[in-house]
Image (cartoon, helix red, strand yellow):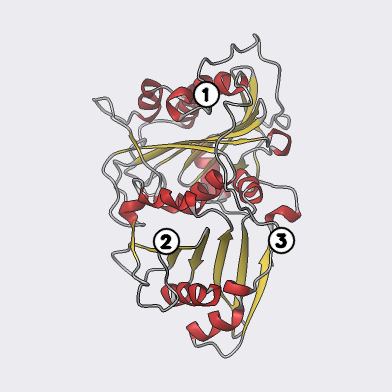
Amino acid sequence: MRSVVVLPAVAAVALLLAGCAAPAPTPTTSAPSETPEPTTIAGPLDCDALVPADVVAAAMSPAGDGTPQPEAAIQGNAALGAIELAAAGGLGCSWRIGPAPSDIFGGSGEVAYLSVEVLPGAAGQWQPAWFGDSPSTDTVEVAGVTASRGAGETGWELTAPVGDTWTTIRLTAPGLVTGGSVYGEYDAEQMNGRLVSVGEAAFPVLAGASAEQLDWPRAAGQRQSDAVCTGGLDPQGIGMALGAGSIEASAVDPTSSAPTSFRDAVAAASRAYRCEYTVDGIPGPTIDAVIGAGEQFELMSEADLSGVYEPLDLSGSPSFADGDAAYVVRVTDGPASTVLLKVGDSVYRVQSHDGAAAVAEAVLEQIR
């Protein structure tokens, strides 16, 4: 199951953003020039230990005068990915420069996001970044590790197997294609160099980390059963909520095949899965389920998710219980199409062109 939230696979645009690079061998790890010294932090590493604040600020510096003041923030369309990564026992670090967007489609040319995501135990599953609609062959040496570079219409990516981890660094900004981007004055090599600087800070820390330092909390009650669209995800209630004449569902389980992207690997490690519905013969809603991730749903209160999602009141449902919560994406033009729902200890993302809130309520009622 592919969930690409920040780097769409658009080949022509990727060529424009990444520049022309000669093909290189498929990236593999290489031995560091020196053995990394273990970090002195006891317990799991945090974002400050991974990338110092001055490195973050330099990597995100926009064109013009002044030094940015990055703020910890999660990009609005990365909500489910952040929850899945936390549920999988990974570390997600993300910063923003520029004003916080007020809706899911918001974000001026002054806005940019930098993210560093670490999935422990996944180095053996590592795959190169995507370059348009195929795996990238562009590589660069970063702190003794051969990393893969890729690009899309919203930004740049650097990814590598580092020690026991699969680590991915992304720098994204609106306006790269239409003009007006905060990085419009820089070429691809300059932007790729910014990601390398972040990797040079983070990779030695991860390579020298102990098992205890990579032991981040994970969802306690992950899915143990097969991926099935029954119970709360049963098509009958979903169809009734949409007024459908007929509805069918099929499950997509990311654990059933090897990952082709970081997002695939995260979804599989969190044991998430997706139900895809066909309504009256036409592709309809999708519902992603992350069983046991109720504690990780607390990320919805963090910036910028708390700004681009607003509470959805389901308290009128007789099935609504203490501890349940729902958020609907905030839009200024057009229907809301995404709902994040917590029921008990599990999290669901409902995406539907019409009736996302009604579908979420149907899920709630069928679970209870």
Q: Mark 2 points at which residue?
A: 323
Label 1 sits on a secondary structure element that is helix
- Which disc, if any, is residue 97? none
Three-letter residue code for mark 1: Ala
Q: What residue type is labelled 2?
A: Gly
Neighbours of disc 3 within 10 Å: few (<14), some (14-19), many (20+): few
Residue drawn at the location 68% of the way across and 35% of the way down:
121
Residue 28 image offset from top left, x and y in percent = 72, 28
Residue 6 seen anywhere in this rendered image of the structure: no
Relative vertical location of residue 114 with respect to residue 174 in this rendering, above or below? above
Numbered badge on residue 225 = 3
Q: Residue 202 carries which label?
A: 1
Residue at screen point 69% across, 33% down? 123
**Snapshot quadrant of residue 47:** top left
Is residue 220 shown to the viewer in this render? yes
Q: Nearer the N terminus, badge 2 or badge 3?
A: 3
The local secondary structure at tag 2 comes to loop
Q: Distance between the residues labelled 1 and 3?
A: 36 Å
Figure check: 225 above or below 85: below
Residue closest to the eye, 32 or 253: 253
Residue furthest out toward the top: 34
Residues under numbered marks 2 and 3 in contact, where contact means CB atoms less than 8 Å apart = no
SS at badge 3: loop
